[in-house]
């Protein structure tokens, strides 16, 4: 007579797995020292490991009848195959949360086509062009206009919305033309649009493509306009000078090949800086070629300086403690270069989370002071720069703070306070102490522009919000949905025209202004 297995089901291993998983997840998510990205990555790892252990329990330790074990395993395989066929992976959010979409879901590009509209068009006049990354002064600030804070009676109006090639570049403008960079299959493109209609006027293309499962596809840098020329940096290192009116190439150089520099993990994102006769970009080459300068007219190499590996910030010009200098935030720290020779005037090490990106451009505040910040739990610091005494300028670290962790968004200075996104949450910190005044509202890893006393914030989910920011509170004046999908790209504002884009669609809105223009 055969024997049947009457041993009871062994549930305790599964219960132990569940309790340990819950315990580890609580420990990770409640830790104040972890960045949101670290919490997400660790949580995914814990959940994945728990799933593997649960499967081992089911097949080897549960003592369930084999027909049940095989049936459950087969069911999980079928469900997994069904989910895989129903959804497609579309990258990650700024917090590294995977993004999936129904395979049959209408794409943003199709939505953009169906929603495209045109308003009553009028050309902008007497407004300062948004000629480079982060605006006229490369500091996310526009001061020649005043926004109407009453969006209820005067709401923003959509002029056009349409598909666009993938990229994390922003727009720049000159007159009634807007320029950006895009990816189109194997081609990297620089495209000129009519600002008020969205019509393509010209495009320049070269064979180059950058693609990363986490970082996405296409160019990262934003073009720079100087007189009748347009300067661009491609994701694979192609620095170009183009005719502004036609897009015809004047000169180009692959700076990575020229200076024997490696392609950074997330692609090249150094938006070209024009200073006098130079175009300056961050390359990360060795032998004194970390930051390099070219003659903006001819493309001839002029100087190089530094040896640090490039990260994803862009250079900026400042006069600090009586010295004209170019600042660049790289892997190992913040460096100041002489504008004429590239020699390093001073440096400040930034050893926090060295394997994670440095993106935000440091902000200069009164008193020869600088605030720098990076994400992934690194935080912020204030530096005081003093004049040189026959050698390098001296640097003093005044304070450090974990209350501002700028991942790849920039921040602004206003009336003694810094406003920015701290790991995705809108925050305000006192520049004298680094202490937090408030932290309210999770808007993800978006971008912002300070427009005189008001602040436009583009959230990661595509919302546009208007704030009256004060040290007491961030008062919301208005909000509207501008884009669908993940929106990391920096916006551009010229006069009343707000240009926004992400990796799939672009739009232009007319934002109401006060009659008085500064």
Image: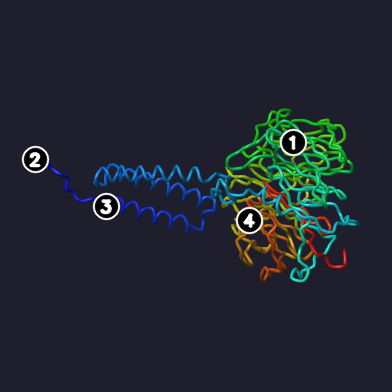
Q: Residues within 10 Å of mark 2 (few under 14, many from 20)?
A: few
Q: Which residue is mark 4?
A: 461
Front-most of residues 450 and 478: 478
What label sits on residue 478 in the rendered view?
Answer: none
Front-most of residues 256 and 161: 161
Compared with residue 292, is residue 23 higher up or lower down, i.e. above or below?
below
Disc on the earlier residue, 4 or 3: 3
Residue 374 in view in this figure: yes
Q: Residues within 10 Å of mark 4 (few under 14, many from 20)?
A: some
Q: From the viewer's perspective, is 195 left or right of 161?
A: right
Which residue reaches farthest right? 126
**Front label number (1 vs 2):** 2
Q: From the viewer's perspective, is 405 left or right of 469?
A: left
**Front label number (3 vs 1):** 3
Question: Dots 3 and 2: beta carbons under 8 Å?
Answer: no
Estimate the spatial distance between the alpha carbons at disc 2 and disc 4, rounded to whole Å. 67 Å
What label sits on residue 1 in the rendered view?
Answer: 2
The secondary structure type at the circle numbered 3 is loop
């Amino acid at each position: 007579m055969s024997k049947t297995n009457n041993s009871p089901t062994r549930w305790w291993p599964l219960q132990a797995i569940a309790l340990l998983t819950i315990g580890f997840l609580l420990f990770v998510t409640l830790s104040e020292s972890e960045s949101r990205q670290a919490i997400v990555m660790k949580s995914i790892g814990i959940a994945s490991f728990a799933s593997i252990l649960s499967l081992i329990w089911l097949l080897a330790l549960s003592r369930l009848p084999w027909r049940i074990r095989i049936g459950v395993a087969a069911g999980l395989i079928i469900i997994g195959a069904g989910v895989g066929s129903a959804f497609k992976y579309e990258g990650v959010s700024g917090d590294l949360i995977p993004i999936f979409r129904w395979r049959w879901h209408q794409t943003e590009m199709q939505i953009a086509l169906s929603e495209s509209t045109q308003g009553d068009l009028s050309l902008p006049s007497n407004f300062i062009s948004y000629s480079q990354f982060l605006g006229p002064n490369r500091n996310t600030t526009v001061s020649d206009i005043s926004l109407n804070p009453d969006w209820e009676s005067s709401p923003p109006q959509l002029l056009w919305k349409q598909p666009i090639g993938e990229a994390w570049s922003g727009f720049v403008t000159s007159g009634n033309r807007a320029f950006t960079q895009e990816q189109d299959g194997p081609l990297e493109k620089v495209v000129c649009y009519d600002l008020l209609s969205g019509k393509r006027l010209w495009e320049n293309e070269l064979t180059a493509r950058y693609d990363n499962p986490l970082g996405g596809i296409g160019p990262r840098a934003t073009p720079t306009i100087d007189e009748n020329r347009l300067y661009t940096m491609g994701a694979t290192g192609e620095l170009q000078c183009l005719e502004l009116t036609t897009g015809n190439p004047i000169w180009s150089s692959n700076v990575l090949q020229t200076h024997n520099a490696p392609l950074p993990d997330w692609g090249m994102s150094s938006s070209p800086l024009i200073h006098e006769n130079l175009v300056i970009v961050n390359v990360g080459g060795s032998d004194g070629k970390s930051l390099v300068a070219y003659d903006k007219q001819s493309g001839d190499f002029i100087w190089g300086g530094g040896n640090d590996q490039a990260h994803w910030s862009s250079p900026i010009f400042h006069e600090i403690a009586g010295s004209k200098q170019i600042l660049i935030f790289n892997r190992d720290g913040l460096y100041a270069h002489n504008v004429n020779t590239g020699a390093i005037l001073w440096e400040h090490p930034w050893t926090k989370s060295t394997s994670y990106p440095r993106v935000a451009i440091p902000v200069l505040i009164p008193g020869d002071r600088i605030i720098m910040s990076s994400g992934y739990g690194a935080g912020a610091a204030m530096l005081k720069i003093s004049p040189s005494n026959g050698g390098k300028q001296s640097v003093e670290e005044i304070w450090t703070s974990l209350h501002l962790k700028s991942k790849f968004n920039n921040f602004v200075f206003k009336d003694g306070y810094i406003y920015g996104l701290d790991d995705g949450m809108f925050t305000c910190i006192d520049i004298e102490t680094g202490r937090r005044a408030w932290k309210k509202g999770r808007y993800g890893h978006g971008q912002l522009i300070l427009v005189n006393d008001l602040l436009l914030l583009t959230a990661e989910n595509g919302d546009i919000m208007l704030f009256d920011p004060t040290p007491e509170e961030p008062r919301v004046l208005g909000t509207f949905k501008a884009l669908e999908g993940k929106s990391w790209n920096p916006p551009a504002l010229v006069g009343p025209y707000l240009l926004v884009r992400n990796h799939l669609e672009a739009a232009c809105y007319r934002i109401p202004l006060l009659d008085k223009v500064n």
